[in-house]
Amino acid sequence: MTTHFRACNLCEAMCGLRIETDGQRVTSIRGDDDDPFSRGYLCPKATALKDLHEDPDRLRAPMKREGKTWRTIGWDEALDEAARGLHAVRTKHGRDAIATYAGNPTTHNTGAILFSSMFLRALGTRSRFSATSVDQLPHMLAAHWMFGHQLLLPVPDIDRTDFLLVLGANPLASNGSLMTAPGMKHRLEALRQRKGRLVVIDPRKTETAERADEHHFIRPGTDALLLAALVNEVLRAGATPLRVELADGLETVRTAVARFTPELVAAPTGIAADTIRRLAHDFRTARTAVAYGRMGTSVQPHGTLCAWLVNVLNIVTNNLDRAGGAMFPMPPFDPRWLPRAMSVGPGSHGRWRSRVRGLPEAGGELPVSTMAEEMLTPGDGQLRALVTSAGNPVLSTPNGAQLDRALAGLDFMVSIDPYLNETTRHAHLILPPPSPLERLHFDVVFPMLAVRTVARHSPAIFDPGPDARHDWQIFVALGKRLDALRGAPLSQRLTWAAMERLGPERLLDLGLRLGSRGGLGGLSLKKVAAHEHGLELGPLEPVFPSRLKTKAKRVQLAPPELIADLSRLDALVAEQSTGLVLINRRHTRDCNSWLHNAAKLVSGPARCTLLMHPDDATARSLESGAQVTVRSRVGEVTVAVEVTDRMMKGVVSLPHGYGHGREGVRLQVATAHAGVSVNDLSDELRVDPLSGNAALSGVPVHVERASR
Ligand SMILES: Nc1nc2c(c(=O)[nH]1)N[C@H]1C(S)=C(S)[C@@H](COP(=O)(O)OP(=O)(O)OC[C@H]3O[C@@H](n4cnc5c(=O)[nH]c(N)nc54)[C@H](O)[C@@H]3O)O[C@H]1N2
Ligand SMILES: Nc1nc2c(c(=O)[nH]1)N[C@H]1C(S)=C(S)[C@@H](COP(=O)(O)OP(=O)(O)OC[C@H]3O[C@@H](n4cnc5c(=O)[nH]c(N)nc54)[C@H](O)[C@@H]3O)O[C@H]1N2
Ligand code: SF4
Ligand SMILES: [Mo]
């Protein structure tokens, strides 16, 4: 029996685990009580690391598709064929005819995150897509414009705040997002113990809302109105907070939000004017306070306005870059300051536009809501090939059924993925990396979002053997071949050789030595690794103005793009809401679309149900358990209804990540708990036009009893 200590890589929380193994088997997975950051906390998903490792459906060797049949092939053959296939498309149709889609687990995979930028450079395509544009893109764009870097994302200082205002997030189920803080339950309990307040704004009375001091239902998609009214109220109260000196544009903001009075926004948001006024007062006068908006505020038509206004509210109440407010983590290994070739850079917007719909590039990527139409619309620049890595866009992006059709028509597709699932079944080649327990893990992304300063190195537990290729090795192998095929200069080939020799471990070591904290001779991988339960360097500290990346080292409170975008809110005020709208939810035992093959995680009553308010059910003569057809502009699904007063009237909710019933999927357990895909209803034409982020929430739907 051997004991290993390791950070869980399944979500942002980075919980420390204590894993017992016996030979090649995992015998137990528990929380690591000695982890100074997570203190023994873990969620039910952690045990899926064992299921994942032992899953007979997990691919262990490259797969090649011939028609509908798959056969196993060797790595050299697979990599050669993948590179040749991509090169052929590049030669015939140009570089931009190859699309790439990077999914969420990329950010939880050390090698993938460190080496994917280089691979993308080797492909040289502008047709880059990722889960970012069905997720946090608005937050990144607001940060780019306000703080000068898309990854300068302010994080709520949850352990020290006196007032936490949560909009559109459910950390008790999601374990936190753009806020890495394991053990959310304990942290919220501690907030209560110190007499702090938790206020939740959500169209569903969520697990988090249940434990809040106050919960207010809000009409989906209207948070920007609420936030504008809150900012307006705070500014009208006349306080001039100290740190606003560090910011430009206060007067512009004041003028721009002046028309959004609590009375104006009460009807469209569904929140009474008095309540808004009181919230503004309480927030402004709390010793410390922080507003925090997440998925519910970003995947809606005004996502970037929301992200901006959350920051503005924190700034005008003097709660940015201050203990108990919203703070900027500066981790020991900081990917923001890596060389440009290896990092995402400070951000950008609108340098080019998508061919069909003219949506803007952001941070070098196009909105994934446009990917299917770029494949299906003939003409110069049509997408002909796709590389997916760690992504399942058929289930995770809007109008998944359309994308499903589009993928079936591609000339060539390669998927770097351990499963044959809804997306990868369209690939010509699947290149599977080993399981998480077979590789080193060092969180590169999430310490940048963590509420304390942390670093942790987790060595591999099992040896994947000589016949395995890690994600980073696949990227290097493909990149090298692609460069050789196009006759890249020798210097480029030498770079690949150097990178291959370096590998993630030496790169991490270098980054730690040069990092934001250590300076040369400071930290090293060895020093971090010596802390087998993780290294914790204390609470966050203020970083302004030196860490701001704006030209003048001042916060830009009033980016012109956002001030202009406020005009869209006038239409929102006038909008008459009729009919039902659909929102999404997450369950503690789901992990986006991809852990449903773990039996323990899908056991119990079926979770893929449509939540509906009793009045809406009565109006349609529906009772809990009734099968209903849910129809939107793009498609329909049939699902059981669950009547509950936890939903706002006029709003229904489906979980995201289900829909495993598609033909050809090799996921034995998941297909037995298939459910329906919410993204067969979400509409790819509904986006936040400023960022191009998908408006997955608030989709108009029609619901009626299913006819047999
Ligand atoms: N309607 C609706 N849609 C949503 C959301 C929503 O709330 N509602 N949420 C959105 C959000 S926040 C996100 S992040 C996206 C997620 O969207 P995606 O990232 O596209 O999808 P995932 O479900 O995370 O699928 C992950 C894929 O990566 C594979 N994988 C897992 N680990 C690894 C690894 O280490 N290496 C490689 N190469 N592959 C791996 C899995 O087999 C799976 O195929 O979905 C978005 N879509
Ligand atoms: N168990 C579990 N944990 C996860 C994941 C998972 O799939 N399962 N996924 C991970 C990922 S990739 C992410 S990005 C995070 C997401 O983390 P969170 O954002 O905390 O999770 P969600 O459940 O998507 O929460 C969004 C909330 O917004 C509400 N909402 C919907 N529309 C609106 C609106 O218009 N306004 C307001 N105010 N609220 C609205 C929904 O009811 C929901 O409660 O979770 C991560 N953690
Ligand atoms: S909350 Fe669960 S899934 Fe997330 S890191 Fe912790 S144990 Fe893993
Ligand atoms: Mo996400």
Image (cartoon, rainbow, N blue to C red):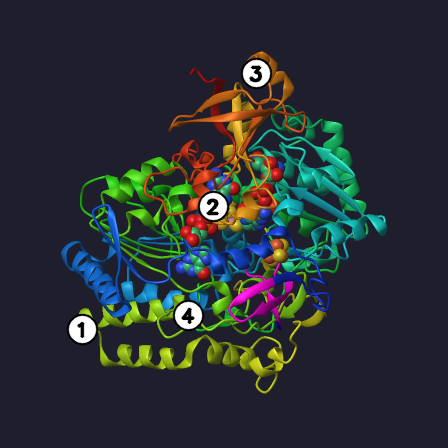
C-alpha distance separating marks 1 and 2: 39 Å
Span shown in magenta: 3-27
Q: Which residue is mark 1?
A: 487
C-alpha distance separating marks 3 and 4: 54 Å
Q: Which mark is residue 19?
A: none
Which residue is pictured at 17% across the width and 54% down the height?
Answer: 93
Q: Is residue 375 above or below residue 527?
A: above
Q: Which mark is residue 593?
A: 2
How packed mark 1 is, by other alpha carbons closer than 10 Å (few <14, some 14-19, many 20 or more), is few
Label 1 CB, ligand 1: below 8 Å?
A: no
C-alpha distance separating marks 3 and 1: 65 Å
SS at mark 2? loop
Q: Quick one: quadrant of the N terminus?
A: bottom right
Point out the residue furthest to the bottom here: 521
Q: Which mark is residue 342?
A: 4
SS at mark 4? helix
Reading the chain from its start, which is encountered first: label 3 or label 4? 4
Is residue 10 highlighted in magenta? yes
Q: Nearer the viewer, mark 4 or mark 2?
A: 2
Q: Nearer the viewer, mark 3 or mark 1?
A: 3
Q: Which residue is mark 3?
A: 622
Q: Is residue 176 visible?
A: no
Which residue is pictured at 22% across the width and 59% down the height?
Answer: 86
Kind of residue sitting beneath label 2 = Ser
Kind of residue sitting beneath label 3 = Leu
Residue 76 image position (x, y, % from top left): 25, 70
Q: Is residue 32 above or below residue 285?
A: below
